[in-house]
Structure formats: structure tokens, C-alpha cells
Image: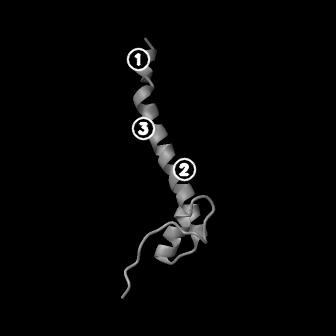
Amino acid sequence: MEKKKLYKSEKNKKICGVCGGIAEYFDIDSTLVRLGWILFSCVAAGIFAYILAAIIMPSESSIAK
């Protein structure tokens, strides 16, 4: 049995071929990988922004004085 290798796709690429390579590795449609990557990026950035805002923003009790 031949061992699979993860690589950037040369034939199924939009920017650099990363999503196409992942799709080929898992034998799924590259559109699904691209959509998943977009959703992951949106959620991860949203979570990061929320944590950052929670650290930086002052509490209501410190402003109301």
C-alpha cells in the first residue's frame, strides 16, 4: 500500500494550492475544504477578537465612579 503525502496541489489551486492539496489528501471536494477554511478563519478571528476585547476593555464598575 502506497503511503499518502500531503502536498500543495498544482492542478487544483486558486491561490497557492494548499486547500486543493488537503482535499486531494483526504479525497474530498476542494470546495468543501475552502468553505471550511473560510468558516474556521471567521470563527477563530471572532474568538480572538472577543478575548482581546475582554482583556482590554474596562469593566462597567471602573467607569461608573
Which type of secondary structure does the marked residue at label 2 adopt?
helix
Image position, residue 33 (x, y; %): 54, 66
Image quadrant where residue 17 sits? bottom right
Inspect the image, locate mark 2, and give the three-letter code of the amino acid beneath it.
Cys
Which type of secondary structure does the marked residue at label 3 adopt?
helix
Q: Residue at x 52, y 71 (%)?
A: 23
Which numbered disc, 2 or 3, marks the residue closer to the eye?
2
- Circle 3 sits on which residue? 51
Image position, residue 35 (x, y; %): 58, 62
Alpha carbons under labels 2 and 3: distance apart: 14 Å
Q: Which of the two discs, 2 and 1, labels the residue nearer the N terminus?
A: 2
| 3 lies left or right of 49 | left
- Circle 1 sits on which residue? 62
- Circle 2 sits on which residue? 42
Alpha carbons under labels 1 and 3: distance apart: 19 Å
Q: Which of the two discs, 2 and 3, labels the residue nearer the N terminus?
A: 2
